[in-house]
Amino acid sequence: MISAAQLNEISQVIDNFYSSNSTHDTQTQKLFQDWQKDDIIAIPLAIHLLDLQNNYSTNCKYFGALTFTVQLNKYLKANSESAVVIGDDIEYNGSTTPDTTNSSTDKQDFLVDCLNELIFQLCAYSITYLQDHRKNATLLPVINKIISNLSIIFINVNKECLNLFFGGLVKTGKIGWKNPFNSFISGCLILMNDQENFLNKKEEYKKQIYENLNTEDSNGNLFEFLNISMQSNKLILSFLNILMEEVIKNVESFRILPIQLSNIFLVIKESCYASVLTILNYNLQIRIDSGKESELYSSDDLLFQTLLSWVKYCQTIPAYMTEEDENCQQGGLAPLIFKILQLMTCDMENFQYTNQCINVFYHLMERDSINSGSNDSGGNKLLDYDIRCMIELQFNPDTPLNIVNPEIANNINKTWILKYLEYLVENELYSDDGLKKLSIFYVSLLENSITALFKKIYVTETDKIDEFHHTIQPNLQFLLNLTNFPLKPIIQETFSSQLTNFWFLVVEQYMSVPIEVQNNNLNFIIPFFTQFMNIYFSKLSLSTRFEIVKEYDNQEVLEFDDFRLQVIEFFDELWTIMGHQHMTFVILERLILIDPSTEFFELEVYILVLNGIFNSMKFNNRTSNMDVIQFLSRDNYTIINKVMKLLKSSCQDVSNLPFIKTFTSFLKTIATFFQRKENQLILNHLVDFLLNIIFETAELPFEIERLVISCLTEICTTCKDRLTSYLSTFTKVLEIMLQIPGEANKTISSNTRIRFNELFGAITSTIDTEALISAVNNSNESEQELYQQLALKQYQHIETYLTLVNGNLEKLNTIKTTIPVHISQEYSISIVVSIENFINGLSKCVNGRSDGDYDDDDDEDNYDDSDSESDGGNHNETMNDTGLNSFSLSRAPMDVGGVNTDNILKDLNNTNQPPLSGGSHSTGSGVSRRTGKIAGATQNHAVRLNNNNNNNIATTISPMDLKKKSSKFMIKRKYNEFLVKFYNHASGSDGVTTFAQQLSNSLYHIMNDTFNLINGGGDNLLFSNSRFIEDWFSCINFIITRNKIPIMFSVEQVVSLLENKLFSSAARLDLVFPSLLSSLKTLIEQRELISNLNEFNFLYNNFILRDNLFENVIIKDPELLESYYNLLTTALDVNPRLIIPHNDDELNLPNFISRLIPESFEILKFSNERFVINTITKFLSKFINNKKYNQLQSNYINSIFIQPQNMISYYNLMKLLFMKILKSSTAEISTLSELIRLIFNKNKYEYKLWLETLLLKDADIVACCNNNSSMISINTDLIQRIAATNGNKRVIMLINDWYLKCINLSD
Amino acid sequence: MSLCEQRLQEERKKWRKDHPFGFYAKPIKKTDGTLNIRHWEAGIPGKKDTLWAKNNAIYPIQIEYPADYPSKPPKISFPAGFYHPNVYPSGKICLSILNEGQDWKPSITLKQIVLGIQELLNSPNPNSPAQDPAYRAFTQNKQKYVENVEKQSLKYSKG
């Protein structure tokens, strides 16, 4: 027993711990746990602390109640047969049958004792609280904790139907604890009769209360108790709420078996259901009757919380009830729904309880149970069809549901929902307590009726069309009106975002009905969705986003951005109904009229939506509707000019990024529009404009610069053919771009520099086809002379580029001590990447043409029928709007190769066509045939592509067009053939040699200078160092792989760059090696560069063996080893001749095999690195078994390995592999086994003997097997099984099984 | 409509109704404008406050649903060469929930998948490397790894 002094001490510790200045130390918490878990003192301590006569603090009393919880958990856990009953940390243990053993009896005794004590304490506390609820309000947490304990007991008594009244006897029928509310009320009423003295007669009243535990309430005690006061009502509500929460908690955590849950549900159904309905109905009714009585407010939250608990409980039941039981549960919620609806609508002035009632309906609807098994004719488990209709009608007065009971419709006030909406809007109740909750509820509500809606949309018989007009139209209109309040989405209303999915479904459904039904409804649908678009246009405005950024959290910003994305996707879907006519053209029309100075938010939204549509239809000259193209050109490209104007003004501030994103994205989307011949001036203007932004905007934020340069790159690479005349301008820009930081007036980011280099490369390599054709047809000079001029002109730009790069690098070298190392280094890196991008742009285009590819761009000819020069003057006027005066980058006159191209080709039909010469694929007759064939097929036919909605993507290809196209194509091809010759023969120009030389020098300069810088920069630059190396080699690899015009490096040049210059530079070889190996691999993969043993030997000796690099560097680094063996495997794979002598002459050449193979054996033997083991094994596999070997090579390999007694032999390799397997992890086994299998496969006659020798006699293997006698039989078994495989793939599996057996033995 | 298509329509509805902010996912359109319900494109933002969220990057993935989906998992891939220890050079993602032999269950939704991939981005599994460069950098040279991921984020930046 605990002494009084100890108890006082304990209570003091508790009070101190919970006092405001307590540190809540863990030591005290541990002490508390020890007390609460103690088998001897815990319960007496809890009873003592709870005793109201002892006058302990509320904290001590609560501690007493909590101690009961701990003890209940502990005992139930210890005595649980089926599952851990309460403990949060333990789950159901899988046992299924509760038994009736002694432990159960012990448990029952314990539960009875606790119940006996706690029910008395609950009644005692409740009476004390009711005596003076203000003074004793602090007792409520203790009361709730006691209720929680009693709920645990209720669940555990009833889950096994324990008989509480015959100690020792269990399972005597379904007895359990029937109605805890009655028990509680009856106990309270007993104590009420002796309010002054009941504490002094505790044992007497305890007994009496317990005896009345299962007494039925025949005298209306419940009603009497509820009517005592609001506090008594509150106590009983709390009991109901806590009990339901405990049951649900048990269900959700799977602590109780389904059959046990069923027991609990049945007790509640049979004994508690009436009480529950009485409690809830009583509480709802007094609120309906009392109006604004403030006394009720204090328990409003509790009531609705209890309703939610009950709803959740009712939704939980079906899954655990038998069919028979379910019938008893019919209408579980129905009686309450009437009352809740009544309460929800009774106050039309302040809508006092509406939101809370909606919350209950929301929880009711969001669970599947309301839909499951139900259909329009009823059959729902919780709510019958009529009740569902009532709810639906209340919120959706024009519901498509069939209302079969006319009384329902008569009882519903259809204007109520509109009044409620007005109330919410007028009072700005936007949050969870108002509009937001309502919109979320609608999502669930509409799911109930959407099937009915779709059935009615899908009216195939035209005579039922009235149904559509009478039911669907008003309903859709009503739902759209929900969003049509002048409120901002996300922050004020969420109908527009929440219902997007609903509208998606409506559109999808509508589009799935037969076309004739669609057409019947167009008179409604088109205006309806036009109205829809207008509403949503304003919702999408970035003005809302700016407000959110200013006043709300990031979460709301994300929500709004997501909303915009969703709506854009929806508009794309909606386009299938509206088409160009009702959507695209409407937006374009508005864009033409809009004033960008005042309506910039609107303009952004239109562009955003338009961009979505264009993106979706993959806007290009071929597929775009001509009307769309014309809209974009209308009024001197007013739409594009407006976009540019707003883009320019937005670039001042990074907060405008969303604007800039929309506008740049749009310009990128319509890039092919600028490719059109007639749009040359606006293209020039746009390019000037974008450059202007990059160079003239003071302190242009990086994010904006990135978007603008990305836009510029897209426009320029798409329209490269139209920008060749711009090269001299771009060269000037390039000069600025390449300036060394600190020297330049304008800071250029690496990203911009790199991207610009790419577009410069692209344009450099491009020819102006129109000009070329014009020159060929109109000039007096010979065709070859013209080509020569043009090629030289192109080459000059490449030369200019390299001169610029080299000049800047030299300058960097002289001033590098005056600028910070990191700036210099970053600049160098960006130059390397820039060069790579320049080459990328250059080579893609030139080589594409040299192959004679048919170019998509040629298709623009299909539309080139307008006079592009007719309105040139007006273009200039428009351009001034965007203020380009400050930075003049206007294009140079159009000329190519000195040829004036202002006179565009007049008539290619009049065939001044040059004779087609040379090449198997370009004969004149061939072209004529092809042209004739296409022309014949299309003669007198217009190809008209028509979609369902008559939104035409129309194009007409005439024979004349085809002829023009063919001529153009042929001239291009001829020029490309000329280019190949030009770059391949020094006689044409010293272009290739010079270019390669210059590029090589540039790369060397960068490498050397940068390494000098890095070496002086200390270890902190180590990483940037390696990144630079990677970029540098990436550029080298890029050059090697694109070894085509105009970048023709000879292998000597590459090797010289790598070998001489790299090794003579200040580069640290250990850092360079990984990338160097990768470059060598690339060289080998380019078959034409390295082709024989000698050449590979040269590489091997100079890069691998030089200065003992293998021993000093490669072998010490697993990553390098891996790369090294990958290189060798690649060589064997690409061309085995690089390593293995290919003919008799080569047999006498020096090679490194005699070194390579023993070395590989050694490395394999000692390496534990997974990647290394795998790589060497793969190399050896390729070395031994290579399908590309000729007979001589196969013999050569066999001669190396065939003698078992040699150190290098198949036998020894097999032994090494088996030993490796025994020491390896499972990850490597399949690779190792595969090599063993290859050995078997190659030596089908020998391998069995080798295996027997190895596995049964070899001393090393036997030692490896720990002389285990079982190993002998396992090994013998393996030999026999393998012998039966004949070296097939099964060997791998057998070795794997063998390995597992060996592992088990060693375990 | 096949079971696969039914399920995918359902997935599409579910996604519209409930998807994590910043992600996108939609079936791609065929050239004739109709949807290819078995081929989706999606975007995964880097998890907030992580390396992968730098530059507001959204990492694109392609989702191919096999005809026997949901019995079999979708094939999901980043663009080829994507830098991550658990992404193969081809772009295929090495994630147990996408592996039929491992944790794939027909009940797994697109939302769970994309969230799983987002989680994987910042929490690679070094026990299941799928590519060498990112794996080695991740295990041996974190600084290099971080810089490469940042460089990649720039590539997939959405402003």
Image (cartoon, helix red, strand yellow):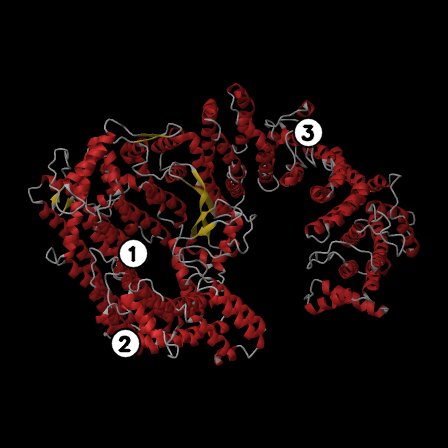
Residue A205 in sight in this render: yes
Q: Chain of mark 3?
A: A
- Tell me where residue B2 appears, x and y as whole percent: 51, 39
Which quarter of the rendering shows the C terminus of chain A?
bottom right
Badge 1 and badge 2 both on one subunit: yes
* Residue that mark 1 sits on: A754
**Amino acid type at image mark 1:** Ile
Query: From the viewer's perspective, is the residue at label 3 or at label 1 nearer?
Result: 3
Q: Quarter-wise, where is residue A278 in the image?
A: top right
Mark 3 crowd level (few <14, some 14–19, many ≥20, 10 Å Cα): many
Mark 2 crowd level (few <14, some 14–19, many ≥20, 10 Å Cα): few
**Amino acid type at image mark 3:** Asp
- Tell me where residue A984 appears, x and y as whole percent: 16, 56
Q: CA distance from mark 2 to mark 3?
A: 91 Å
**Residue farthest along the front direction in this orientation:** A1245
**Between discs 2 and 3, the one toward the N terminus:** 3
Closest to the observer, A170 or A732: A170
Q: CA distance from mark 1 to mark 2?
A: 36 Å
Closest to the observer, A1290 or B57: A1290
Badge 3 and badge 1 both on one subunit: yes
The residue tagged with tag 3: helix, strand or loop?
A: helix
* Residue that mark 3 sits on: A386
* Residue that mark 2 sits on: A1106
Q: Chain of mark 1?
A: A
Number of numbered callouts drawn: 3
The residue tagged with tag 1: helix, strand or loop?
A: helix
Q: Quarter-wise, where is residue A417 in the image?
A: top right
Q: Where residue A667 is drawn, which disc sits there? A: none
**Between discs 1 and 2, the one toward the N terminus:** 1
**Amino acid type at image mark 2:** Arg
Give above or below for A319 relative to A740: above
The residue tagged with tag 2: helix, strand or loop?
A: helix
